[in-house]
């Protein structure tokens, strides 16, 4: 009998931190565990080498006329730091109440195991199921998926399917599933500012040169207006107006702004005028500072003027914004505003593009949508409603899944994104967890969705 909770525990025990070169054994262990699991339920499985962390490709074949679905996931996780904030060790999964705690439980090992368990149960019950299934599971999602695009370009012929199915997005409550219909794009870069050629004694040299931290702080402060708008000329030029149906669908969430504020632990919101906090996180572009540093960071004091300071900046972008254009606008603004008595470097990082994932109007299927994909949407709507007790909502997601755009551009495939993780799951943070009740319902719904797709 396939026990998804025990399998998830075993999966989480592998510290598969793709960003950490010392975690190679954890990456290998997680990869081999998933490959072995898929082989055990009847899949032809291979581990395909990439420039860094291999991709697992597992096939269940069948007749050419059978529908073909690709199920995507990733076996890598974020670093667990800061370790002192975890109540239990991050790679020793613990169940407390109806939650399983551990790094990767919600992102993405729990959701991935949900679909593996659904497939295992379905094939045990229906070994003759007329459905071709391919699992495509990467190990670099948490570092920007650098090997993913070359992989799908190289193996394009092997990845011809009807749609891609995945769970790497969120839901607001355990009883309210969201099928994501839009993802914000992403542009990332660093700014490194240099003053003197070395750290200087602040008593001997203070007052004769600009401190790189001051230069960086002044620059960062200039990139927003007091009301929270991004203060970069042209930043909003291509932003489209929000459609009325999108506001109406979001209103169905019935979320309380006060509860959201308390959840965040902030004294007040700082959102765009004319947008609710919930609209701002889904419909508007952003510019955020993700990390900043320079000078002495230890206990006590050290009176130095640092030689260098840095800031990490990310922009979440909405449909119709071009990441390259936004990056160029930002670089131009930074060059104009940076003080002339320091030097600086702009360092490109990973970037993605906006992508509309599913049709917004379920009753008005686009003419170019494949019959199998349309059937998948109908099956998802019906199955999720039956299992979770409420019809799913179709909403944009505030986050980014850049691989979705690559899949659409290279393979020509749309994606069905079945959200499963909750706000309280603490993705990327200490004490990450996954709701086991949501997992069990997700397994049942996913099993029904796949069976309905196969029936035709």
Image: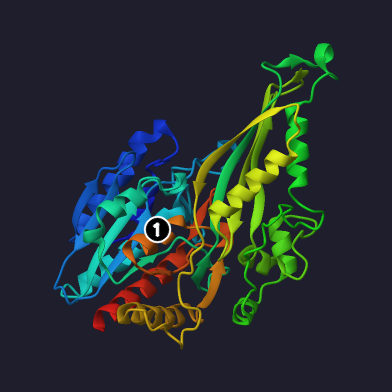
Residue 167 in picture, x, y percent from top left: 42, 63
Answer whether residue 152 is visible to the viewer in this image.
Answer: yes
Residue 243 spot, x, y in % from top left: 61, 78
Residue 429 seen from this side = no
Q: Is residue 186 above or below residue 30?
A: below
Quarter of the image containing the N terminus? bottom left
In the foreground, 136 or 346? 346
User: Dot 1: few (<14), some (14–19), or many (≥20) neighbours within 10 Å?
Assistant: many
Q: Choose top left, top right, bottom left or bottom right for residue 14.
A: top left
Which is more toward the observer, 372 or 113? 372
Task: Assign a secondary structure to mark 1.
Answer: helix
Can you say whether 449 is above or below 403 in the image?
below
| 304 relative to 138, above or below | above
Residue behind mark 1: 406
Q: Residue furthest left?
A: 63
Q: Which of these two is toward me, 25 or 202? A: 202
Q: Is residue 240 above or below residue 251?
A: above
Q: Residue at point 31% right, 62% down?
A: 116
Q: Residue at x 44, y 43 (%)?
A: 92
> In this image, 151 relative to 64: left or right?
right
The answer to whether 35 appears left or right of 176 in the picture is: left
């Amino acid at each position: 009998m396939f026990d998804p909770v025990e399998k998830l525990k075993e999966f989480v025990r592998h510290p598969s931190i793709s960003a950490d070169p010392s975690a190679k054994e954890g990456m290998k262990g997680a990869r081999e565990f998933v490959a072995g699991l898929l082989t055990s339920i009847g899949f032809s499985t291979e581990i395909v080498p990439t420039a860094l962390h291999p991709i697992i490709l597992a096939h269940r074949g069948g007749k050419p006329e059978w529908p073909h679905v690709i199920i995507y996931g990733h076996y890598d996780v974020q670093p667990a730091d800061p370790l002192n904030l975890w109540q239990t060790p991050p790679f020793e999964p613990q169940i407390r109440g109806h939650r399983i705690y551990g790094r990767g439980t919600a992102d993405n090992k729990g959701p991935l195991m949900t679909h593996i368990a659904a497939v295992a149960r379905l094939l045990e019950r229906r070994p003759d199921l007329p459905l071709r299934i391919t699992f495509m599971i990467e190990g670099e999602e948490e570092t920007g998926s650098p090997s993913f695009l070359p992989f799908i370009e190289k193996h394009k012929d092997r990845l011809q399917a009807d749609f891609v199915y995945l769970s790497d997005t969120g839901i607001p409550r355990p009883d309210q599933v969201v099928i994501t219909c839009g993802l914000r794009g992403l542009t990332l870069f660093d700014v490194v500012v240099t003053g003197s050629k070395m750290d200087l004694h602040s008593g001997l040299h203070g007052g004769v040169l600009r401190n790189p931290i001051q230069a960086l702080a002044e620059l960062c402060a200039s990139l927003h207006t007091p009301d929270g708008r991004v203060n970069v000329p042209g930043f909003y030029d291509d932003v489209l107006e929000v459609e009325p149906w999108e506001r109406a669908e979001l209103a169905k969430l019935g979320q309380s702004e006060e509860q959201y504020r308390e959840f965040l632990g902030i004294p007040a919101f700082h959102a765009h005028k004319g947008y609710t906090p919930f609209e701002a996180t889904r419909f508007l572009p952003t510019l955020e500072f993700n990390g900043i540093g320079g000078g002495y960071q230890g206990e006590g004091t050290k009176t130095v003027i640092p030689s260098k300071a840095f800031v990490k900046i990310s922009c979440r972008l909405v449909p119709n914004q071009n990441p390259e254009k936004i990056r160029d606008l930002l670089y131009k603004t930074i060059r104009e505003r940076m003080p002339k008595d320091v030097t600086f470097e702009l360092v490109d990082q990973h970037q993605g593009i906006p992508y509309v994932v599913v049709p917004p109007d379920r009753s008005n299927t686009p003419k170019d949508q494949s019959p199998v994909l349309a059937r998948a949407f109908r099956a998802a709507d019906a199955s999720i409603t039956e299992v979770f007790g409420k019809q799913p909502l179709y909403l944009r997601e505030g986050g980014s899944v850049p691989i979705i755009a690559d899949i659409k551009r290279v393979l020509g495939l749309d994606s069905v994104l079945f959200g499963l993780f909750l706000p309280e799951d603490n993705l990327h943070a200490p004490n990450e967890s996954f709701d086991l009740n949501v997992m069990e319902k997700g397994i049942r719904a996913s099993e029904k969705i796949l069976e309905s797709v196969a029936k035709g």
